[in-house]
Image: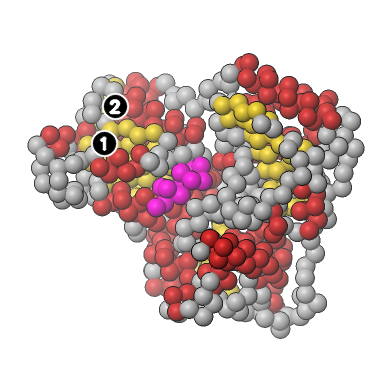
Amino acid sequence: MASITLGRYLFERLHQVDVQTIFGLPGDFNLTLLDRIYEVPGMRWAGDTNELNAAYAADGYARIKGMSCIITTFGVGELSSLNGIAGSYAEHVGVLHVVGVPSTSSQAKNLLLHHTLGNGDFTVFHRMSANISETTAMITDIATAPAEIDRCIRATYVHQRPVYLGIPANFFDLEVPAELLNTPINLALLPNNAEDEEEAIENILSLVKVAKNPVIISDACAIRHNCKEETKKLIDITQFPAFTTPMGKGSIDEHHPRYGGVYVGTLSEPAVKKAVESADLILSVGALLSDFNTGSFSYSYKTKNIVEFHSDYTKVKSASYPGVQMKQLLQRLLPLIGAAASDYQLKQVPEKQSLKGSDATDPKTLLKQNWLWGNLGSFLQEGDIVLTETGTSGFGINSTTFPNNTTGINQVLWGSIGFTGGAVVGASFAAEELDPKRRVILFIGDGSLQLTVQEISTLIRWNLKPYLFILNNSGYTIEKLIHGPKAAYNEIQSWDHLSLLETFGAKDYDAVRVSTIGEWNTLTQDKEFQKNSKIRLIEVMLPVMDAPESLVKQGELTARINARQG
């Protein structure tokens, strides 16, 4: 074929970068674009329940596949998605946001169209999104449209940030040369400045040579910017003790002999806190130092010998190297760092924490958070994708030992309650595309679930088979621990959770409730339950004010900080 429509060109390009599922909702300004999805073999339209959930789903998909695409309609649709898009921007997740906008003739005539503010301004929503996008584009010329689409896809993938692409409704069926598809989109990083990179390497090696007590800390952007393999090699070559942050959990195989645990400032296990804070050199890979990722900024390094590897700059002590990207820098550094670390005397990593509670084996004991998270690792399998919601789950998972190659999804920085209720959909689509046997496991509180519960319908529609663990502790426990333990605004209406799957149309499913250690063990040790052969909902009954120790401490820290600021 000599030419194809611009709409098909977009989906062919997305398919070339392994985006196979498109998220979003139909609207009259994007309907003819959506027709073109079905012309590309292997592509599917998820059809989410609302735009916010679709944005969360796109985020979850991108964290597994590398990037994703959400399509919304002008105004009402795109604005409904922006909370989710902002979260992807904050947390470095590559989501291409395609918006069907009114035709160029309608805009030129300043028509008083629906979905507008009624003032003739057709650019206002584009301007809103610009603040939470790596770059934006509004197609105005069919001759340059394919190049703009390619640029937007490249920026989404390379920078791991949302990108806004507006396409007028009259452009979807315009023809462009099909031969353009024969040239793949260049997804390679631009080269680092050679002189700056060389200087950074020299300074890093000089610090490594004299370090007696160095550590490596891996954070979120080691995952987002595809540096897990480089981080592993850094640990293997140097043999330095290695730690993650909460956002970086899953970036290091936790059975690696040099893995020491999760560092969260004052909220860390004592041995982890001591090991990190007594270091005389810290190699920090992909840090995102938010309050909940650092124990309310309670990092207490004793050294100024800190090397920060970031996606778009490197910092060695006080010297900054803008544009020196960590992936290429680490690849250059790895063959050299072994010799520099040759005098390092192996230091013991902290022992893994043991389970707490003398009644940990009594089957009649009621479930509590510390026991749950301490024992969860025995249910998890290699390759699992584990989503933990903002709240008790997000803090508790730090006490769980992941099997190798386990992927953790959380939203520690943006912290939008209900995020994982949508993200589990995207993660489930991605897992099915990569390996249908790969399990997707969600932990979400009863309060958070109420924000995004409709997206369970999308899971059932596509016969996706995640595990949905609903932690029922009667309301917003994380909020109660910060302020208002008895306040009405922290309470919620109780739901019949075991009826949810049937309500949303599921035919082949499991829905069970567990409240004791014995019931948990019986369920999770069942061989059939361990297979993701159907969608499963498990309601986990927990005491109202029970919470992981780290969350209790975080709540106390936050309450004190808020009191001082007040």
Amino acid tagged 2: Ala
Query: Residue at 68% across / 19% down in the picture?
Result: 198
Where residue 282 appears, x then y in whole percent?
74, 39
Q: Is mark 1 on a helix, strand or loop?
A: strand
Identify the magenta region: 83-93
Using the image, tell me which numbered label, if any, was put on residue 457: none
Q: Name the foreground residue: 27 vs 249.
A: 249
Where residue 341 appears, x then y in whole percent?
83, 30
Q: Quadrant of residue 314?
A: top right
Tell me: residue 78, above or below residue 507.
above
Quadrant placement of the N terminus: top left
Q: How many labels does the image show?
A: 2
Classify residue 22 as left or right of residue 438. left
- Is mark 1 in CB contact (under 8 Å) with mark 2? yes
Q: Name the foreground residue: 311 vs 291.
A: 291
Q: How far apart are marks 1 and 2 (CA)?
A: 9 Å
Query: Residue at 62% across / 16% down in the picture?
Result: 194
Residue bearing mark 1:
167
Where residue 85 appears, x then y in whole percent?
41, 47
Residue bearing mark 2:
145
Tell me: residue 296, above or below residue 505.
above
Query: Residue at 84% across / 30% down in the picture?
Result: 210
The secondary structure that most of the magenta stretch takes on is helix
Where residue 467 appears, x then y in whole percent?
55, 63
Amino acid tagged 1: Ile
Classify residue 360 as left or right of residue 69. right
Crowd rating for badge 2 (residues with CA inside 10 Å; few <14, some 14–19, many 20+): many
